[in-house]
Amino acid sequence: MACTCHEKDPLVPKIAKLEFVRRDTPDVTTFRIVSPEGEAPFEFKPGQCAMISVPPLGEAIFSITSSPTEVGYIECSIKKCGAVTDYLHTLEAGDEIGIRGPYGNNFPIEELKNKDLLFIGGGIGLAPLRSVINYVMDRRDEFGKVDIVYGARTPEDLVHPNDIYNVWPAAKETNVYLTVDREAKNWDGNVGFVPSYIKELGFDTNKVALVCGPPIMIKYVLQGLEEIGFKKEQVYTTLELKMKCGFGKCGRCNIGDKYVCKDGPVFRCDEIIELPDEY
């Protein structure tokens, strides 16, 4: 009998296939991934990540965009920004990739129950937040009021348009606030950066905030939340963009004494030192 020890090795990718591919923006595509048997490649929790490989180009780690309440598949929304992602953007439904995971910790779902929630995302940073937002939407009675603030450079760069324009605003006790960086044709929504918009909206502080976006945005959103009265222990952020190997060997994801892949990517903000402007 042939040895199948590698099948249990967490560092060996499993074969998976793309069930469908959806272009969300000019440089962001969402991939629905299933096993060869048509099932989810593995179980996960909101906030965790998957390592996707495309031999011989290499592999990269991505946040999982779908909610574990959506059984039978996982989704990843991937921004085109390098050799691996460029290649992924050429793939079509039915093509095969390698996948392993899940990696990292998750948003503290049990601690969030019955609380009012404020989600703040920027650009592709909506991807990991979408997982926990859809979890909350699918179990809506278990959570309090929900506010979602999301911004991007232009209207065309706002990902998951069906969610932000149709699905989430229709949910009970849920408000969606959209903003873009600059004036645009046929855009009658807010214009301005997310950190400034947060302060303009004037949210009360009796809620938990979950934040994800470009590093500089996260830094100034956290500062803005503190200015309006949020304590660090009320705010969670995810730093999955800094993850590389996923299991604590490459040493490229440390922030102070924390390793994002081992201690995160989800952190309560009193657990981390001041963030760098970029990483």
Image: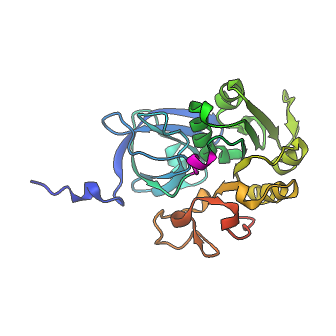
Does the magenta portion include 110?
A: yes
Q: What is the x, y in percent for residue 195? A: 83, 51
Q: What is the x, y in percent for residue 73? A: 43, 36
Q: What is the x, y in percent for residue 55? A: 39, 54
Does 186 sit left or right of 172 as displayed? right
Q: Is any part of residue 111 visible from this angle?
A: yes
- Farthest-out residue, bottom: 257
Does the magenta portion include 241?
A: no
| Residue 117 image-quadrant placement | top right
For the C terminus, the image quarter is bottom right
x 51%, y 55%: residue: 61
- Farthest-out residue, left: 1
Q: Main secondary structure of the magenta part?
A: helix
- Asked if 186 appears above or below 14 in the picture, the reply is above
Q: For the magenta stretch, what is the residue range?
A: 107-112
x 50%, y 45%: residue: 88
